[in-house]
Amino acid sequence: MTRILAADDSASIREMVQFTLESAGFDVQCAEDGAKALELARVSQYDVVISDVNMPNLDGIGLTKALRALPGYQFTPILILTTESSAEKKAEGKGAGATGWIVKPFNPDTLLKTVNKVR
Amino acid sequence: MELDMERFRQIFLQECAENLDVLEAELLAMEAGLTDDDAINKVFRAAHSIKGGAGTFGLGEMSRFTHHLETLLDELRSHKRQPTPALVALMLKATDVIARMRDDAAAGGTGQSPDAASVSAQLEAALGAADSEVAAATAEPLDDGHSPWQLVFTPYSDILASGNDPVRLLRELAELGLVASQCNFGKLYDDDFDPQLCYLSWTLTGPGDIARQDIIEIFDWVEDECDVVLTRQAPTAQSGAALAEPQAEAPEVAPAATASAISASADKTAPARAVAAEQSIRIDIRKIDQLINLVGELVITQSMLASLEGIDGLDTQERFAKGLSLLKNNTKALQESVLGIRMLPISFAFNRFPRLVRDISQQLGKEVNLKLVGEQTELDKTVLERITDPLVHMVRNALDHGIETPELRCQKGKAPGGTLTLSARHEGGNVVIDIQDDGAGLSRDKLWQKACEKALPLTRDRRLDELSDAQVFDLIFAPGFSTAAAVSDLSGRGVGMDVVKRNISELGGSVEIQSQLGRGTLFRIRLPLTMAILDGQLVAVGEELFVIPLINIVESLKLDPQCLLKAGGGVVFYQLRQQMLPVLWLSQLLGTRGEPGAMPLLCVVEAAGRKLGLVVDALLAQQQVVIKSLEQNFRRLPGISGATILGDGQVCLILDVPALVALHVGQQGDSDAISAA
């Protein structure tokens, strides 16, 4: 089963992401910020990481950089949840080593389609 | 994928309310100059989160509006801009608009607010220029639309380091119908081969009816990690065959187009139907843990009792008795914990006051320092919801009539800024809320003068010096009473302190006033902790039993028939010491079965400062009763606030004392209501 790690500080987005992906048969673990996600990634290997950009403690860009430096996460697909307004965030995300992005607002279909692209 | 977005929408709405609180609190702090980078980041995240969620959960208008606020905050965050007072005030206004949009969405709407357009324009003006919205998808480059495609895909060697895999791209291209016709191995066989790099490149071909956009979109994420050359193959050997499109410009189209397509589909997921706002409550996880523990205990006790089944003997009886007492303790603890779930800290009501006090004091040209004390004091959610409006009214009053203008305060030798303290604490089974100001205080003379002008019953045949302070101060709770010279925008809203007092007494609470002229005023509200259980006095009327809330009972005495006085219209009064009490026979009012007792008792009850005598046949036990709603199980009955079930299974009605008092004391033309207090 594909294991997905999702980091977002918004409970509603987290629940939606978790429910959507679990309904599609993925094994999903959620974290409420980048630091918690990194902690989870340190102890366990995930196949895909989805991360919000703006989060307390450690943001999505920082998380991406930290993950890429982690053994086992060199080639793991990392998707950044971003907004249409932050083209520079995409560039920043890419620079940090992100694989791609999911543009907010997104719906369950988009999410699944995007995740299926990389898994 | 079919998914019930509604449930996530509800979570979002709740989260949104929390984020709005953060926005408001931090913006207020910013206004007071108490802010740092962390705080600004926090505000930014709150706005950002609202925007993202609103878009995702089908509230496009709200998302678009919040976008402007977010952009402003982003500029503050990156120090491109300083938080001027005007800017902070504007952002607070924007917060209000978002709050209204949220309320509209919670009520089943699409998240609209009447002020959105004007505030939005102000935000845009503040931003300098209208934010360029996402450009519409640009027209597709001209092509003939049917010649077969040829695609040369050359990933850069480090493409794998971003987690992108050419295999995935090839797979997607294949799904569209593009097949690899040639693979170039590049430097794959060189000596310095690095397994972490990509050396391959591909040439693909496919039918010409695939949209260019669809092909280009696949390379969305890797536009700067590969070279892509997409061309139409010339069907004939014509000269001027399709040019190799420079790849750079095409992908720009893709994100914009996807963004608009997604927001369109997200809009569709928003159900337009009116959904009753679902009530939910956030509970401290410790409370849940405690419940789980208690249920565990209960299960253990149950199995202990079950093990005694069918065993005789003295020992068994002892163990049975022990089990029962355990069961009793567990049930009680469980009941307390379950009721505790509905308990919320009063900060839920207090949190709105910093903003309210700021706005009103600015409007009135006063300086007010608000102090909040005991915000963690918990009370029942229902009580909390219903006490908020009266609190708001009393705070408005304190600011409007209580605290003086800075000039006046200086003349009186006080500090120019007044202090308003809101505090809450537990006292016995009650919550006590104090609203205290250090303002002008209440003037006995002015109140009395006003009461005489209004010809209030209390003023008949009385002189001011006969009355206690409490009696005079209570005048402000009389209907239609206002000390303001002119009805102001703030307190003259058609809701007087009489309504405040009534609301409080409907909750089974009371309010008292202490004041010193020139020193300030204190309003002290006492409320029951919960409306789910109450301390009741069981009374018998004929053959039937009723519950009178203990909090309403002043005293009970043997009825002396000689003290009964009949007035006109069948009204009966009872002379209790110096007072005349209206009296009501519950047996007549409720049409009870059975003969009246030989020794009737008079139960004196009070609500909203008015007393009423209720004639009953016997006083029985005092006990805690669990309140069941009559409205939900039967229908509303006048004079009855609910029902309860007694230990023997009998259903017993609970008297609604405030309603009875209002009905039977009010009818007699405000019969000396205040003197009865």
Image: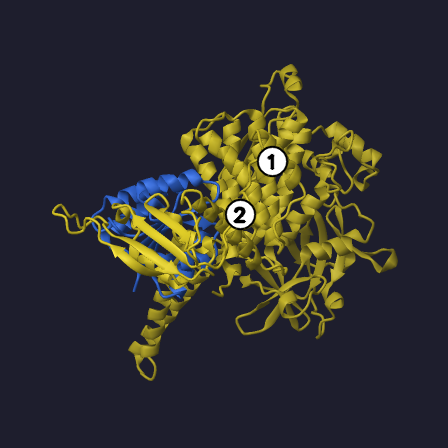
Q: Residue B93 carries which label?
A: 1
Residue at 20% of width from left, 49% of height from top? B196
Q: Which of marks 1 and 2 precedes in the sequence? A: 1
Residue at 81% of width from left, 54% of height from top? B667
**The furthest residue to the left:** B191
Q: In this view, does B417 lie to the left or right of B48?
A: right
Where's the C terminus of chain B, which quadrant? Answer: top right
> Which residue bears the numbered disc 2?
B137
Residue B661: image location, x then y, percent: 73, 54
Q: Is residue A45 left or right of residue B60?
A: left
- Judge by depth and name the residue closer to the eye, B152 or B409: B152
Chain shown blue: that is: A
Q: Is residue B312 left or right of residue B244?
A: left
Say if residue B428 shows up in the picture: no
Q: What element carries label 2?
A: loop
Chain shown yellow: that is: B
Say if residue B212 shows up in the picture: yes
Q: What element carries label 1?
A: helix
Identity of the amino acid at label 1?
Lys
Q: In this view, does B538 lie above or below B368?
A: below
**Which chain is mark 2 on?**
B
Residue at 22% of width from left, 48% of height from top? B197
Residue B655: image location, x then y, percent: 66, 61
Q: In this view, does B27 lie above or below B314?
A: above
